[in-house]
Image (tube, rainbow, N blue to C red):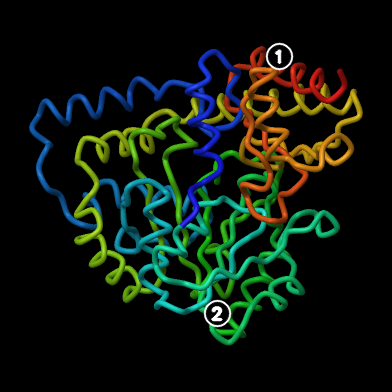
Amino acid sequence: MPRSGIRAFMDLAWAAGDVIHLEVGEPNFATPPHVVEAAHRAALNGSTKYVPNAGVPELRTAIADKLRQRNSIAEARPDDVVVTVGGAEALYVSLLAMVEPGDGVLIPDPGWPNFRMIATLVGAEQQPYRLRPEDSFLPSLDELDRAATSATRAVIVNSPSNPLGTVLDCHRASELLGWAAKRGIWVVSDECYDELVYIDGAKSLASLPGAECVVSCFSFSKTYAMTGWRVGYVHASRPDVVDLITKLQEPVIACVNAPAQAAAIAALTGPQEVVAGMRDAYRRRRDAAASLLRSHGVSVLEPAGAFYLWVDTAPWADDDWQLAHDLLTNSRVAVAPGSAFGAGGRGFLRLSLATEESVLLEGCRKILGHLSP
């Protein structure tokens, strides 16, 4: 199993010392103080024992409330929710529940490299479906038809997308659900950036008609700057799916640690201004960095969600991986090469906006200096 190219460049960047980090999608904001305090109180009060496999009832209730109010999943109930160790384990345990070895899983290309890694771990056949510029880097039924086979059991959909920042509109999302229902396959909806959206009209797949085949995966990491806390969750409307995922939690992780679950409760039920503040900061950084790069003739895909810029390097370099190495070695800027996200990412770089604006812009200027010495 090839490791993630993002992690490979993180390791190189850490070893390089004093560099500008634009390679990793980790918020530069601190976890909100009231969230940290909730975990501290829980630990001091003895909440350090085993808890139910699916999560503590208070957190499952808070998540169901959030899904109804913010994701418009009108029928979401606490019993539809399983708390996981971050969004990555949510994706893993979901695919583990619905895929047998040899089954096919449709994976977006470009897409988060861990999708391919998870498919490998569950013994599935990876079936990349291309996200093309002419389709606005969104899933098309033609591409899904081209990639699917009789062995296809599930399709992974990521909106907002990592690395692209694209967001599914309701029409295309409804088309995708109809396509999946016709073929009798599961839709695994990765929505870990669900509250970092800069446009109106974005919808969770599970909020749309015909969503019985959808299993949705979410995370606290990006929304609340809680990457190291490792709390995510799965939502499914079918009780048999929830029961199976809950059962699989036992041999995989047993349960998410209790203080982190207390922190997650505080994050959901406490003040939400921090979320809006971070989202506004990412939007400002997006606009400033995109404007700077475009002013020098660099083509940038402006994200509708998440916190990445997808930068076209074709006029300057054929090998995005080598370009990323050169930028790190010669310009002291760490970026993620597009080919780390699949064959469809060749000729691109992903720049993370999750760093302080002045540092981000300095990194962009260094990249421009390297491209046009």
Disc 1 residue crowd, few under 14, some 14–19, many 20+, Cα 10 Å:
some
Q: Quadrant of the C terminus?
A: top right
Q: Residue at x 56, y 26 (%)?
A: 278
Give the vertical position of 67 relative to 165 (above or below).
Answer: below
Disc number placed over residue 6 in the picture, else none: none
Q: Which mark is residue 152?
A: 2
Q: Nearest the camera: 225 or 144? A: 144
Quadrant of residue 266 within the rendered picture: top left
Residue 362 numbered mark, or none: 1
x, y percent for residue 40: 21, 24
Could you classify mark 2 by the number of other residues whose Cα lies within 10 Å: few (under 14), some (14-19), or many (20 or more)?
many
Q: Which image quadrant is residue 243 in?
A: bottom left
Disc 2 on helix, strand or loop? strand
Residue in view at x 64 percent, y 24 percent: 328
Q: Nearer the viewer, residue 62 or 235?
A: 235
Give the structural element (helix, strand or loop) at label 1. helix
Identify the amino acid type marked 2. Answer: Thr
Across and down, in percent, residue 261 comes to: 26, 40
Q: Is residue 203 left or right of residue 245?
A: right
Q: Is residue 346 above or below residue 149?
A: above
Q: Amino acid at mark 1?
A: Glu
Name the residue located 55 percent from the left edge and 40 percent from the top edge. Answer: 6
Q: Give yes or no for contact between labels 2 and 1 (Cβ–Cβ under 8 Å).
A: no
Q: Position of residue 208 (x, y in %)?
A: 59, 66
